[in-house]
Image (cartoon, rainbow, N blue to C red):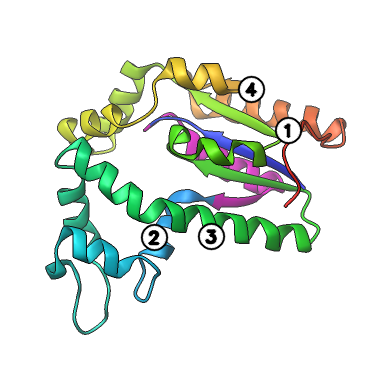
Amino acid sequence: MYVLFLTGGTASGKSTAARELERLGAVRLDMDQLSREVLAPGGPCVGSVAAAFGEDLLDPASGSLDRRLLAQRAFESAGQARLLEGIELPHIKGLLLRRLRELEGRSVAVCVVEVPLLDRVEDLRGLADELVWVRADPLLRRQRALGRGMDARDYERRLAGQPSDAYLEAHADTVIPNDGDAEELLFRLRSWWDEREGQGWQKRGGVTL
């Protein structure tokens, strides 16, 4: 199985790219979705999160976390955000490994993993045959985010917690520019897909699960 890590900052177009790759035939795994799973009622780190950020986050009837309130508390400071990451990331990584093993067993050809914070999962980098960065100018990303209704302060807070463009450029195998419209992005993705498919999805390293 050819494993692709797809990354990019807020409003870069990463999720649009991931959906297009899924449409082209890749199986898609989203680390944000994995986060929601490990924090679902009965999830492996729900209790630890409630203990760290307040038992009032838990609905006593359903056992579900108030994710909106959790986000408010977790993103009050960089230290709080790191605390949440320290609790949930080991469980997210473990779930990702299990999902990749399951896909290997199903003889899946290509899997795209949406990675929102690449610097937090450097220890998993060896799992990927290719790392693709969807790049967009920071000012354009801000314009897009605010145009979708995101609060400016929320955007700046998210941006501050994300790896820099310099970091992503240093680690990416492939860069897909997204400073134009959606059709330009989709064209570039299809061209990349056709090239890799034509090469038979040759392995570029990585490890065997």
- Is residue 178 in the magenta section? no
Residue holding disc 2: 36
The numbered mark, 1 or 3, whose residue comes first in the sequence reads 3
How far apart marks 4 and 3 lie (CA) works out to: 26 Å
Quarter where residue 159 is shown: top left
The numbered mark, 2 or 3, whose residue comes first in the sequence reads 2
- Is residue 16 in the magenta section? yes
- Quick check: 90 above or below 169? below
Residue holding disc 1: 193
* Residue 8 vs residue 192, the one in the foreground: 8
Residue holding disc 3: 95
Left or right? Give the position of 34 relative to 172. Answer: left
Viewer-nearest of discs 1 and 4: 4
Region in magenta: 10-29
Which residue: 31% across, 68% down?
46
Q: Name the kind of residue labelled 3 in the image.
A: Leu
For the residues labelled 1 and 4, say whether their Cβ atoms are less than 8 Å apart.
no
Q: Secondary structure at mark 3?
A: helix
Q: Secondary structure at mark 1?
A: helix
How far apart marks 1 and 3 lie (CA) works out to: 27 Å
Residue holding disc 4: 174
Q: Position of residue 139 (x, y in %)?
A: 31, 16
Q: Secondary structure at mark 2?
A: helix
Q: Secondary structure at mark 4?
A: strand
Which residue: 28% across, 42% down?
82
